Image (cartoon, rainbow, N blue to C red):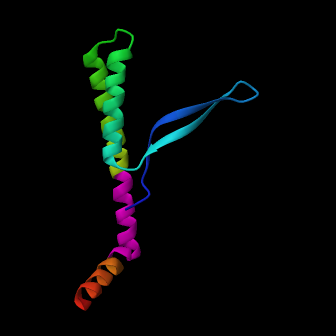
Amino acid sequence: MADSKVQIGKMMHGRDDDGVDQFTPIYAYCEETIERNYADLRHMLSMFGRGGNEDAIRARSAARLAEKLADFRKQESDYEQAQAAAGITAARQATELIAALRL
């Protein structure tokens, strides 16, 4: 569908000559990837966290997941609205109708 993406992490590549950390963002392009990433992150934090409260870890993870999903859904909605405003949706539906009539 759209080129919607949400940053779910960052990968460190090392440091430059000035000692500044160099990162590349990690993006998710679908809701399933976002959900899987935060489920994996929650499990890792539960296992390797510094004696934190598991309920607090779950709550923070759930809040971050909800925030990322809301951001992704907003991007998808904005994309669909832009398509409808530009007439792309109507053109696509007309093309599909013509193709169906030819069968």
- Identify the image quadrant of residue 56: top left
Q: Residue 51: image x %, image y %? A: 35, 8
The foreground one among 92 and 47 is: 47
Position of residue 95 in the picture relative to residue 100 (left or right): right
- Identify the image quadrant of residue 76: bottom left
Q: Residue 94: image x %, image y %? A: 30, 83
Q: Is the stretch drawn in magenta largely helix, strand or loop?
A: helix
Residue drawn where x is 35% and y is 80% of the image:
91
Residue drawn where x is 34% and y is 30% of the image:
40
Q: Residue 14: image x %, image y %? A: 64, 28
Position of residue 102 in the picture relative to residue 64 (left or right): left
Q: Is residue 80 magenta?
A: yes
Position of residue 21 in the picture relative to residue 66 (left or right): right
**Residue at the outermost top position:** 51
Residue drawn where x is 29% and y is 81% of the image:
96
Residue drawn where x is 34% and y is 16% of the image:
47
The foreground one among 102 and 4 is: 102
Identify the magenta region.
74-89
**Residue at the outermost right position:** 17
**Residue at the outermost bottom position:** 102
Q: Residue 55: image x %, image y %? A: 25, 18
Give the quadrant of the N terminus. Answer: bottom left
Q: Examine the rendered structure and indicate whether residue 99 appears above or below residue 46.
A: below
What is the total number of numbered labels drawn onto the structure image?
0
Q: Is residue 65 magenta?
A: no
Give the quadrant of the C terminus. Answer: bottom left
Q: Examine the rendered structure and indicate whether residue 16 appears above or below residue 98.
A: above
